[in-house]
Image (cartoon, rainbow, N blue to C red):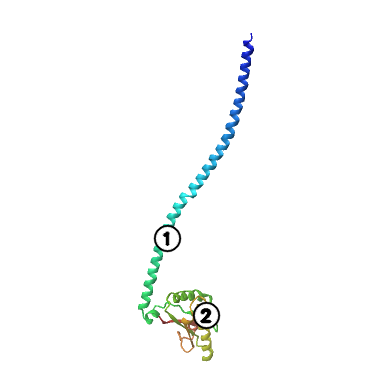
């Protein structure tokens, strides 16, 4: 008769212990799992970030750096060689040969005006680039006028036109001591017809290469 209560007590204690253990088993893995999971996630993220930004980027930058310097270096060398050849060709030419090629464009003016027109700005920019490229070159700018008006008036107007062209060239970086000015007034003409088209041809700033 004493064995039955003892057995029931043992079973009851065992069941309670099992429930307690089951509860502990559920709680502990949940905390450990979340901690280790976040740790693994953070570690994996850091490793991924380090792997992504560390090794691949360094190798990419290394390849990019070597490739860039190679292409830039070869391009720079080729352009330097081309410039050297251009300078040598220029040095071999006479002034007559240089001016025959018309490397510098003339610019034109409105009636009785000496201000630089909009259509002349791009031409003068190219002229300035050419003069700066050949450091030994000097140029003369001749101011011309059409045949109308007195000689005195046109000589003064031609001087103002030549001076305006020079000032614009200097503003583009050409040293002023490499530019000489001459006013031709109406004493010399490019066109001798009595027409507006011809008069426009004569209202100009004319470039000549005078030293090299």
**Residue assigned mark 2:** 167
Residue 111's spot in the image, x, y percent?
54, 83
Whether residue 30 is visible here, answered yes or no, is yes
SS class of the residue under badge 1? helix
Residue 101's spot in the image, x, y percent?
39, 78
Quadrant of the rendering where the C terminus is positioned: bottom left
Out of 3 and 49, give the one closest to the viewer.
3
Out of 61 and 32, give the one closest to the viewer.
32
Horizontal side of residue 2 vs 65, given as left or right: right
What residue is rendered at 58% in x and 36% in y?
34
Q: Residues within 10 Å of mark 2 (few under 14, many from 20)?
A: some
Residue 91's spot in the image, x, y percent?
37, 77
Whole-number angstrom distance, CA of label 2 to CA of label 1: 40 Å
As drawn, 84 above or below 11: below
Q: Quadrant of residue 87?
A: bottom left
Out of 67 and 133, give the one closest to the viewer.
67
Horizontal side of residue 149 vs 101, given as left or right: right
As drawn, 136 above or below 34: below
Residue 106 marker: none
**Residue assigned mark 1:** 69
Quadrant of the rendering where the N terminus is positioned: top right
Residue 162's spot in the image, x, y percent?
50, 83
Q: Of marks 2 and 1, which one's residue comes earlier in the chain?
A: 1
SS class of the residue under badge 2? helix
What residue is rendered at 54% in x and 41% in y?
41
């Amino acid at each position: 008769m004493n064995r039955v209560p003892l057995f029931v007590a043992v079973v009851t204690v065992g069941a309670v212990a099992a429930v307690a253990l089951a509860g502990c088993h559920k709680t502990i893995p949940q905390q450990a799992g979340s901690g280790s999971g976040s740790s693994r996630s953070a570690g994996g993220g850091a490793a991924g970030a380090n792997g992504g930004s560390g090794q691949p980027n360094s190798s990419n930058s290394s390849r990019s750096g070597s490739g860039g310097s190679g292409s830039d270096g070869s391009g720079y060398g080729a352009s330097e060689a081309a410039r050297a050849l251009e300078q040598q060709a220029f040095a071999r030419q006479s002034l007559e040969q240089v001016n025959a090629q018309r490397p510098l464009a003339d610019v034109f003016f409105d009636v009785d005006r000496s201000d630089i027109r909009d259509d002349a700005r791009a031409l003068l920019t190219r002229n300035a680039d050419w003069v700066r490229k050949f450091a030994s070159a000097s140029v003369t700018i001749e101011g011309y006028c059409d045949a109308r008006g007195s000689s005195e008036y046109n000589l003064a107007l031609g001087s103002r036109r030549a001076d305006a062209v020079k000032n614009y060239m200097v503003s583009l970086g050409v040293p002023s001591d490499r530019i000489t000015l001459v006013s031709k007034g109406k004493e010399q003409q490019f066109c001798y017809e009595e027409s507006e088209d011809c008069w426009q041809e004569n209202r100009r700033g004319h470039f000549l290469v005078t030293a090299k």
